[in-house]
Every structure is written in structure tokens, then in C-alpha cells.
Image: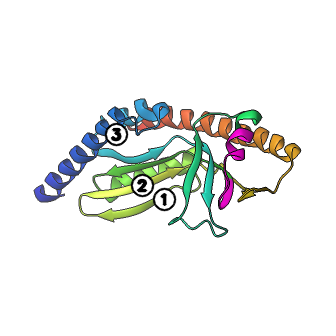
């Protein structure tokens, strides 16, 4: 690593760290992962660029779930109950409404490919099967760490509810179970990552 690349990485890390602090102040970062993200900024030659702790969501979209027209109808960074779900579904009346459970995801930047590979090996040994190096260029390599917990089901189109009350109650149970499993794995991952990579 020459001095030019070294300076480039330091600038990149400084930028992402400042961006993180700004996002935390503006309440744009999931509160549950703030302590972990701040600890990452203290690790030599590592930074974090984006993250999500995991969530249950109601998404407004079309039949193809086109990202260009998809928007959040409701986001829950916690377990939900049947009554609030019904209430949030009732007020939706245009387009397709999907219920999803999405896993935690972290983007971890490194100084070089060697360190990124080390992180990737750790992630896979931890059990994150979808971990991958998603970008690499001089002074900056990005590793994606994500869980495999997932659920997606169509609930409603316009004013027409496709599913029964019994089905929704079961979906609430399943979604909460998946959310809870994701939370347990995320917390264990955060602890083991910091223990492994901190000086």
C-alpha cells in the first residue's frame, strides 16, 4: 500500500465516520446497532458505510415489486401485534401491499482486499452464508454481511384484502419469530466481530 492509497483510505474512513455521526444525530440509523457501528469506527483500517438491524415492513409496490415505485407503508424495528397490523393494512388503498421480514445487513469497508478477505472468512465461519465482497478499488473494499432470515407475502391490492384474519394472525406469529431469531443472531454477531477484530 503506497502513501497515496493510504491517504485515500484515511480520507474515505474519515468521510464515512463523519457521515455516520451525522446520521445518528438525525435519527437516521437504527438505534439498536449504533453502539456496534461506533465500535467499528475504532477498528484500525475498517469503517462502516450503511446498515440495517433487521425489520418487519409493509411495502407498497406493484406486482413485480419494482424498486423504482416501491415505498414503505410501515416499518417496524421490533415485533408487532395483530391489532396494529390490521390497523396499518386497513388504511392502505392503492397498489399492492407486501408484508416482509428483512434481515440485518452491514456494509463494512476495509483498507485492502487482504483485510476484506479476512473479514469474509470470519463472516462465513460465523454462519453468514450470503456474505460477500461486493466492491473493491484502490483504498476501499466493501464487504456485505447479511443474515438469511426472510419472509415475503402479498397481503392486499387496492382495497381488496387477499388473506383471512386467521392467516394474518399466523403471519404475525411467523414474522415475530423470524424477527426474534434475527435479533439473537445479530447481537451474537456484533459481539464476536468486535472481539475478533478489535486491537
Q: Does the stretch in magenta take in 196?
A: no
Marks 3 and 1, how far apart at CA: 25 Å
Residue at 55% across / 33% down in the picture? Answer: 187
Q: Quadrant of the N terminus?
A: bottom left
Left or right? Give the position of 118 relative to 180. left
Query: Residues in magenta?
Result: 85-98
Residue at the disc numbered 2: 143
Question: What element does badge 2 sit on?
Answer: strand
Q: Is residue 197 visible?
A: yes
- Label 2: how many residues lie within 10 Å, few (<14), some (14-19) or many (20+)? many
Residue at the disc numbered 1: 132
Left or right? Give the position of 139 relative to 30. left
Where residue 77 appears, as percent x and y from the top left, is 57, 37
Left or right? Give the position of 38 relative to 106. left
Q: Quarter-wise, where is residue 175 in the image? A: top right
Residue at the disc numbered 3: 23
Marks 3 and 2, how far apart at CA: 21 Å
Left or right? Give the position of 75 relative to 178. left
Residue at 55% across / 48% down in the picture? Answer: 125
Residue at 61% across / 65% down in the picture? Answer: 65
Question: In the rendered view, would you say 74 is above or below 114?
Answer: above
Mark 2 or mark 3, which is nearer the start of the sequence?
A: 3
Where residue 44 appears, as percent x and y from the top left, is 27, 40
Mark 1 near mark 2, Cβ–Cβ under 8 Å?
yes
Question: In the rendered view, would you say 130 is above or below 169?
Answer: below
Amino acid at each position: 500500500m503506497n502513501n497515496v492509497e493510504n491517504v485515500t483510505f484515511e480520507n474515505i474512513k474519515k468521510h464515512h465516520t463523519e457521515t455516520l455521526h451525522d446520521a445518528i444525530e438525525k435519527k437516521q440509523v437504527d438505534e439498536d446497532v449504533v453502539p456496534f457501528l461506533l465500535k467499528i469506527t475504532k477498528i484500525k483500517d475498517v469503517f462502516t458505510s450503511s446498515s440495517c438491524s433487521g425489520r418487519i415492513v409493509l411495502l407498497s409496490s406493484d406486482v413485480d415489486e419494482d424498486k423504482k415505485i416501491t415505498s414503505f407503508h410501515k416499518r417496524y424495528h421490533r415485533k408487532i401485534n395483530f391489532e396494529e397490523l390490521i390497523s396499518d393494512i386497513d388504511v392502505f388503498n392503492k397498489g399492492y401491499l407486501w408484508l416482509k421480514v428483512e434481515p440485518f445487513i452491514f456494509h463494512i469497508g476495509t483498507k485492502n482486499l487482504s483485510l476484506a478477505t479476512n473479514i469474509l472468512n470470519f463472516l462465513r465461519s460465523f454462519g453468514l452464508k450470503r456474505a460477500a465482497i461486493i466492491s473493491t478499488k484502490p483504498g476501499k473494499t466493501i464487504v456485505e454481511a447479511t443474515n438469511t432470515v426472510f419472509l415475503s407475502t402479498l397481503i392486499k391490492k387496492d382495497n381488496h384484502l387477499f388473506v383471512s384474519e386467521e392467516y394474518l394472525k399466523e403471519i404475525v406469529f411467523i414474522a415475530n419469530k423470524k424477527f426474534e431469531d434475527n435479533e439473537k443472531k445479530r447481537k451474537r454477531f456484533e459481539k464476536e466481530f468486535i472481539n475478533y477484530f478489535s486491537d
